[in-house]
Amino acid sequence: MRIGVILRPALVLLLLALVLKPAWFAPVFAPLVPEGTPVIYARSSLLSLSLSHLGLVAAATTAATLVAVTLAILVTRQAGEAFRPLSRTITNLGQTFPPVAVLALAVPALGFGAGPTLVALFLYGLLPIFENAVTGLSTLPPTTMEAARGIGLNRWQRLVQVEVPLALPVMLTGIRLSVVISLGTATIGSTVAARTLGEVIIAGLLTSNTAYVVQGGLIVGLFAVLIYDALVQLEAHLVRRAGG
Amino acid sequence: MSPPGLLFATLGLAALAAPFMTLAANRIVAGEGVMAWAVTAPAVTLPGVAVVMAGLLLGLPSEWSRLRFAGSVLGLSGLLWLLMQGAPRLLEGAGDYARVSPAIGFWCLLVILMLLMADSLARMAPGPLARGALLAAVMGALALILWSGVLSQLSILQEYASRKAAFADAVLRHLALAFGSLATAAAIGFPLGILCHRQIRLRGTILPVLSFFQTIPSLAMFGLMIPMLGWVGDRVPGAQAIGIAGIGFAPAFLALVLYSLLPVVGNTVTGLASAPPAALEAARGMGMTPRQRLLRVELPLGLPVILTGLRVVLVQNVGLAVIAGLIGGGGFGTFVFQGLNQTATDLILLGALPTVALAVASAVMMDILVELARPRSGRAG
Amino acid sequence: MIEIDQITKTYNGVSVVDAVTMTVETGTITVIVGTSGSGKTTLLRMINRLEEPSSGEVRINGESTRATKPHLLRRRIGYAIQGHGLFPHHTVARNIGAVPKLLNWPKDRIRTRVDELLALFSMDPEQFRDRFPAELSGGQQQRVGVARALASRPDLLLMDEPFGALDPIIRARAQDDLRRIQKALGSTIMLVTHDMEEAIRLGDRVAVMDSGRLVQHGTPAEIIAHPATTFVADMVGDVERPLRLLSLVPLSEVVEDGAATGDGLPADASLRDALSSCLWTGRTAVPVERDGAVIGRVTLDAIRARAELRA
């Protein structure tokens, strides 16, 4: 825990420097490439790539969260009961589909660019959020639910005031899983011409420029680790608040 | 009336109104859609379409799961019939480079009918052995269809025909990557998990480090392996001789192993901790040594959870091994990324479809193993 | 004979068990009773060295427990705990045969022993041998737990709140069973409980622990009649002391000649049962029976005489 207090801000600073002032790192990466080759990726600004990358993930995750939570609420109601086994099958089977394959399969249907990436991120992001939301909503303490009925809350009030708030930490876990997968899949999205940080790595792989690969890998890796960590902290905060 | 059945029937009928197959002048250009009833003479297509519709309608009654299952099989055979009758007919006189492939309508119907099959199976709740038999039957049917050559005129199989050797190579390489990294991760992960189970302090250090690895996006991880292994390959004598180099198999393999460690170690720790404390206390009280407690109580009780970890790893690695195609590691990814580069849809499918099939088959197989490992008492109650 | 000699356990400078000395005769049941935190469980766990004593020693038949490796020592000592601790993935037979297997008994000998024990605990071997713990009732699980502890004919049986998880009716039956089986096998048993009722009902000797110290060790009658400290008196409960005393005396001790009306009681029932029967049916005496034949009666006056403390 105590290491985190120092490490976290240090990593944030490192990430900001890598994205905003890439030129600072030229001496660090220089030994990785033969002399004369470019060390710092300059074909487009790392800041704009980062924003585009994060924007794709944010848009896909927001849409996936809205749809997945709505579906989860529907199948945990009496009326949606008949779809429960089917939804479980779809989430189980769907999650065995490799994210890269989903991305690749989106291309024939949607062409190249941000479109197929967004759709692949959205579709794949749905599954963990939906699965966790269903778990959260269907494992509420029965006594609490009984009490909520007992004090006269109607179905809508129970859902909004009791069920969703109690299931929130579990749902957030699903969102976190989904974000981590999306960050990774968006990186590969640059192979289908989406503008993401993967572009830097791919450019490095295509031109055998190890400096690009390391630069891109570091930035993407740091984003993923820091975002993951922030979401973990948020969950822990919510759980603490719910617990005491 | 089964609500999902109704949904499937509605969607399925809508999908029948979408192009069923595409005819293109060559393998790159976009083709023209052909409706299901127009792929060949109506005398042949109409019975096929009727069979597909009948299959969808059999999915409607909610009580008879066997009937719904039969409906899905019927519908799928209808699809196969239309495909194998349509392909040669459409190619007739269309030119030497012409390609036919299944179109959006076919894929939607395929997914819908497979969901109908899955939904009816979920209600029948077959045991592990029945599921194994079913998996074998599906694989066998698929192999028979491909081997018989009835679909060989489809574009994707033409891509295959011109790459037979490369495909066989990719299969072996993909399996080596996925299963080899699984075996390596298990060989490292089990002892590490047992150690973490015994020592809480170690657990507190190892598990966060492993979950850190798990968080790093796959492309970054594969990329970062390149300079590291390149360095090792250059500096350590003999390393290159055994295949350790910056690009190719080694970095892909190492990246997969790193990704696999968290599920293996984490689930080993969870599994070993799942033995009831009272049973462990009793085991200690009756004079079992730590080793006996591990082998006779903790491991057998934790086996389902440990195997679940291996399932996660296997499915994950089958998918991630695709990325190896980007760094010269081989496998199905080679076709996927070649296809993306050439905008050749069928080549993409030639890489992606076997990956998906392998991932799903691995998941089903591992689920069966997990269930068999569960102690009888647990299954009864 | 088990000799516990000045045994002490300290955690971070605090004595959880403080210089306890006591002797347990072979073939008897000693019940260690105390509130939670009194050190009774720690005392028990030091006997089979699940906890190592800070000082002092335990001798079983004259031999120090330190002379044997802990896991080998434990194979000679039966151990039954609250919530039974059965292995959920093993059948009843494998559970009961666990220690004999550790001791490398031949298969057929283990099998015979398992059937013998199941029969002893009134469970049909044919029916129960191959069941899993999850398929048994709570009372059956507990019996299998005790049978497992007895399987290798241990020198000593340690029991830590063995009946704690059972409901009152099943618990009473389990206690009677234990008494009967202990008599039949002549086992030496040390049992820990927080329930004085259970201690009085089961124990040949009762040891009362308070804050790590052994405050009184004697027969149930002595404990009830002459509590050594106010703590012991509190545990016994002043109001119920006469009733507890009566529960220790069988009718056969006070039976007298004479007639009485109404339903009779068996000679091994306690005076407490007789008193209860008198009050309930408004009689002043109840007939006493042995093997179905009336052998005399017990009167309210006789009961009253035994309930008064002979200080």
Image (cartoon, coloured by chain):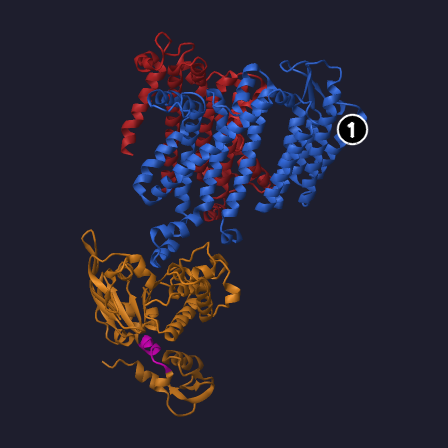
Chain colours: A red, B blue, C orange
Percent position of residue B138, x then y:
63, 37
Corner quadrant of residue A11? top left
- Residue A197 or B17: which is nearer the viewer? A197
Graded by Cα atoms within 10 Å as few (under 14), some (14 to 19) or many (20 or more), the crowding at tag 1 reads: some
Corner quadrant of residue C75? bottom left
The residue at 58%/27% (across/down) is B353
Residue A123, placed above or below residue B310: above
**Circle 1: element type:** helix
| Residue A235 visible in rendering | yes
Quadrant location of the N terminus of chain C in the rendered image: bottom left
| Residue A62 visible in rendering | no
Percent position of residue C42, x then y:
27, 59
- Residue C113 or C214: which is nearer the viewer? C113
Left or right: residue C222 compared with residue B325? left
Residue C265, placed above or below residue B365: below
Left or right: residue A88 compared with residue A210? right
Chain letter for mark 1, please.
B
Residue C287, placed above or below residue A200: below
The residue at 35%/77% (across/down) is C247
Name the residue at the bottom extreme.
C258
- Residue B236 or C263: which is nearer the viewer? B236
Percent position of residue C208, x then y:
26, 67
Quadrant location of the C terminus of chain C in the rendered image: bottom left
Magenta part of the chain = C242-250
Name the residue at the right extreme.
B43
Residue occupied by mark 1: B46
Magenta run includes residue C216: no
